[in-house]
Amino acid sequence: MIYKKDILKDLLPPIIIRRLTGLFYGWHGNYSDWDSALAECTGYDSMSILDMVKQAALIVKNGKARYERDSVLFNDYYYNYPLLTALLYVSARQGNRLNVLDFGGSLGSSYYHCRSILSSVSEPRWNIVEQKLYVDSGIELFQDDILRFHYTVDECLADSLPDILILSSVLPYLREPYKVLESLMQKEFNYIFFDKMPFIKGQDRITVQKVNPEIYAASYPCWFFNENKFLQFINNKYSLIYQFDNQDRTNIKSVFRGYLFELKKLSPDLSV
């Protein structure tokens, strides 16, 4: 199992790291359509990737690592403060209750990352909607009274009514991200939290992401978005509460940002 290593980063300047990264893995191309990019990829749904993620998630569940991300284990005290802020903000406005829908939430990466901080929240519920193989494993190995797994959003909504929808690094890996987002917005979640959204200047761009083989061997299509287009799309129905910059970087000139939005009809005066 892989643990965080910073030795190379300590020895080489950041610009050299980025250039070396781009030579062997990272984001490449500017494809005319999703299928053209997909034809050059191995995909994300292989059993080998699931097995690695599952093993890492079990280690975290059993308290032998603090959290995992894409099967990589971490033992430091890093917290995703923008996400925690969003969860505590929503909880405060919901009478100290919290019901989350983590769309594309793997086997509970964000949940296990946040659970110690959210111990004071009453009646917590963390729902995950994922690919079938992940949901099968989630139900078998991880599901409990708080953490629940669902095959579809509608199945989740039939079981409970989440207050906040989390979309963390998920829209870039969908064939039709705006179509999916429109469908989710029609459900009128009170809040939507976006994290690790990649933006570039100019038009939306489809690339192929080649994963660092130290994590796992895989490649898949990945969108980079135009930020103004994205914000205009969201602002039709939601008001911006806050935004923040992520530390993620790629070999393509881009920025990564996140946002917390609130449904406009809840409290229009909170928009900025």
Image (cartoon, rainbow, N blue to C red):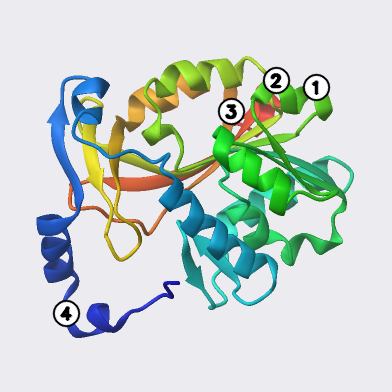
Q: Amino acid at mark 1?
A: Ala
Q: CA distance from mark 2 to mark 1?
A: 6 Å
Circles 3 and 4, Cβ within 8 Å, touching? The answer is no
From the viewer's perspective, is residue 246 above or below residue 229?
A: below
Identified by mark 3, the residue type is: Ser
Horizontally, residue 141 falls left or right of residue 75, namely right
Front residue of 241/209: it is 209
In this rendering, the answer to whether 72 lies above or below 196 is below
Whether pointer 1 and pointer 4 mark residues with C-beta atoms closer than 8 Å, the reply is no
The residue positioned 71% from the left and 29% from the top of the image is 190
The structure residue drawn at horizontal position 33% and vertical position 79%, both measured from the top left corner, is 6
Q: Nearer the viewer, mark 1 or mark 4?
A: 1
Q: Residue at x 43, y 75 (%)?
A: 3
Q: Nearer the viewer, mark 3 or mark 2?
A: 2
Q: In the rendered structure, find residue 158 and report the number of the disc placed on it.
A: 1
Q: Nearer the viewer, residue 214 or 224?
A: 214
- For the residue carrying disc 1, how many other residues have a C-alpha within 10 Å: few (<14), some (14-19), or many (20+)? few
Q: CA distance from mark 3 to mark 4?
A: 42 Å
Residue tagged by mark 4? 12
On the picture, is 180 further left or further right than 165?
A: left
* Pointer 4 local density, CA inside 10 Å: few below 14, some 14–19, many at least 20: few
Locate the C terminus by quadrant. top right
CB-based contact (under 8 Å), mark 1 and mark 3? no
Inter-mark Cα distance, 1 to 4:
52 Å
Question: Label 3: which residue?
Answer: 239
The amino acid on which the numbered mark 4 sits, given as a three-letter code, is: Leu
Task: Residue at 66%, 33% (x, y): give it.
Answer: 191
Foreground mark, 1 or 3, reads 1
Residues at marks 2 and 4, CA–CA distance in whole angstroms:
48 Å
